[in-house]
Amino acid sequence: MATASAQGRAAKATRPRTFREARAMASSNAELGWGVFMRISGLLLVPLAFGHLWANNMAFNAGEIDFAYVAGRLSQPTVKIYDTFLLLFAMLHGVNGLRYSIEDYVKRPGRRFAWKMVLFTVAGIIFVAGVMTLWAFSFEEMGDAVRALGTQ
Amino acid sequence: MYRGREGQWAFVLHRLSGVALALFLLLHVVDISLVMLGPDGPFDVFLVFYHNWPFRVGLLMVIAGVVYHGLNGLRIIIMDFTSWGVRYQKQLWYGVLGLTVAIGIPVLWKIVPEIVAAI
């Protein structure tokens, strides 16, 4: 196993092998925490996002989605709970990923800060709108009314 | 960009698909939020936009992006937590590409005729 251990040593230069080494490589404890969060949320998002795409693109013709379809889905408690987890993890994972891109490509500190503030503000407003859509409205009546119109 | 090998292409595609998916997520939450404004609200305007065939082709790219980003993310997790994951990261990446194509074929088979029929 000489070659394996040699490769192990070579990998050690670029990759932390223990949590302590990962902490030593990360620029801060918070950054290490976000790195761990990206792995955990990513693992959860694989079934959540794949299931969401399956329900709306494979089990249904996405070209026929209309108000009644969305209202019908959003009036189901299971969809509300499922979509809440999807929204929460996708938002945190996606916005943190966009933040990584800003940190990497916007070189001037003032502009980097400004871009991040714009991102967090816009994403925060959109996240609140998403939570309101899932929990603050009753779509039963609206969905029923539209379906009744369609059958007349 | 320097002389990229598999690992770098894996990163470039992960970054590009990630940024595209995050921006689409923001748009998607906005359009679904318009449902709050009721059946006579601006949601219909968004639907006309979404059901145009160029946008539906774009949605196929969103699906491809989700599949690639998700599978390559699993590759990254394997690389983080196992030493064989780093040793075989190249092979794992070809596996990610192969699985993305393998999943993409039945998806295209189902959705492309729907788009063509609606033009």
Image (spheres, coloured by chain):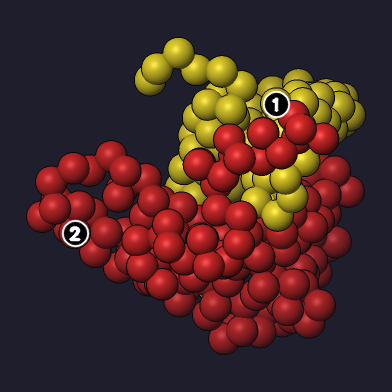
Q: Nearer the viewer, residue B104 or B49?
A: B104
For marks 1 and 2, give the CA distance: 36 Å
| Horizontal side, residue B24 vs residue A7: left or right | left
Q: Point out which mark residue A113 bears.
A: 2
Give percent across and percent down for residue B88: 75, 31
Q: Is residue A67 visible in the rendered structure shown here?
A: no
Which residue is depicted at the point 70% across and 26% down? Answer: B90
* Callouts 1 and 2 on one subunit: no
Amino acid at circle 1:
Lys
Which residue is depicted at the point 65% across and 51% down? Answer: B80
Crowding at mark 2 (Cα within 10 Å: few <14, some 14-19, many 20+): some
The yellow-tinted chain is: B
| Horizontal side, residue B2 vs residue A131: left or right | left
Colour of chain A as rendered: red
Q: Nearer the viewer, residue A8 or A61?
A: A8
Crowding at mark 1 (Cα within 10 Å: few <14, some 14-19, many 20+): some
Amino acid at circle 2:
Phe
